[in-house]
Image (cartoon, helix red, strand yellow):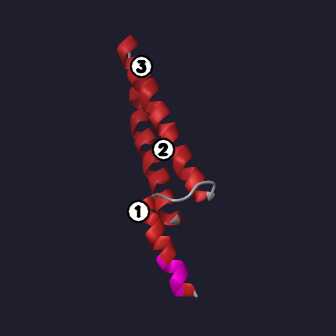
C-alpha cells in the first residue's frame, strides 16, 4: 500500500536528519566505512520504497493480501 511505502520513506529521511550531524563529526577510517555503509543502506531502503510507491515493483508479500482485499471490496 502506498501509505506504508510513504511512511517508510519518511522514517528513513527522519533517521538521516538525525544522523547527518554525526556524519560530519566522524573521524577515522572505520567511522567512514560505517557511515558509507549506513548511507548505502539508506539509499537501498529509500529506493525500494520509492519503487513500490511508483508501482515499479510488486509490494511486499505481506501487503499484497491487503491490496487484493481492497480490490475485491471495490468490485
Is residue 38 on the magenta stretch?
no
Q: Label 1: few (<14), some or many (≥20) within 10 Å?
A: few
Residue 48 higher or lower than 66, as above or below: above
Label 2 to label 1, Cα distance in Å?
A: 17 Å
Indicate left or right for 11 with 75 as reference: left
Q: Position of residue 67 (x, y in %)?
A: 50, 72
Q: Position of residue 34 (x, y in %)?
A: 38, 23
Of residues 16 and 54, the one nearer the viewer is 54
Query: Mark 1–mark 3 contact, CB under 8 Å?
Result: no
Residue 18 higher or lower than 59, as above or below: above
Mark 2 or 1, which is nearer the eye? 1
Q: What's the residue at 51%, 59% (across, down)?
A: 59
Q: Residue 32: in sight, yes or no?
A: yes
Residue 52 higher or lower than 42, as above or below: below
Is residue 70 on the magenta stretch?
yes
Lower position in the chain sequence, tag 2 or tag 3: 3
Q: Residue 62 shows which numbered tag?
A: 1
Label 1 to label 3, Cα distance in Å?
A: 33 Å
Q: Which residues are magenta?
A: 69-73
Q: Position of residue 11 (x, y in %)?
A: 43, 51
Residue indicated by mark 3: 33
Secondary structure of the residue carrying tag 2 is helix
Q: Residue 53 shows which numbered tag?
A: none
Residue indicated by mark 2: 45
Lower position in the chain sequence, tag 2 or tag 1: 2
Lower position in the chain sequence, tag 1 or tag 3: 3
Amino acid at each position: 500500500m502506498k501509505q506504508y511505502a510513504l511512511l517508510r520513506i519518511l522514517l528513513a529521511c527522519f533517521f538521516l536528519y538525525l544522523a547527518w550531524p554525526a556524519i560530519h563529526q566522524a573521524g577515522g577510517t572505520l567511522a567512514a566505512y560505517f557511515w558509507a555503509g549506513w548511507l548505502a543502506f539508506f539509499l537501498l531502503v529509500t529506493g525500494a520504497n520509492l519503487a513500490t510507491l511508483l508501482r515499479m515493483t510488486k509490494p511486499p508479500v505481506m501487503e499484497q493480501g491487503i491490496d487484493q482485499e481492497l480490490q475485491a471490496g471495490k468490485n
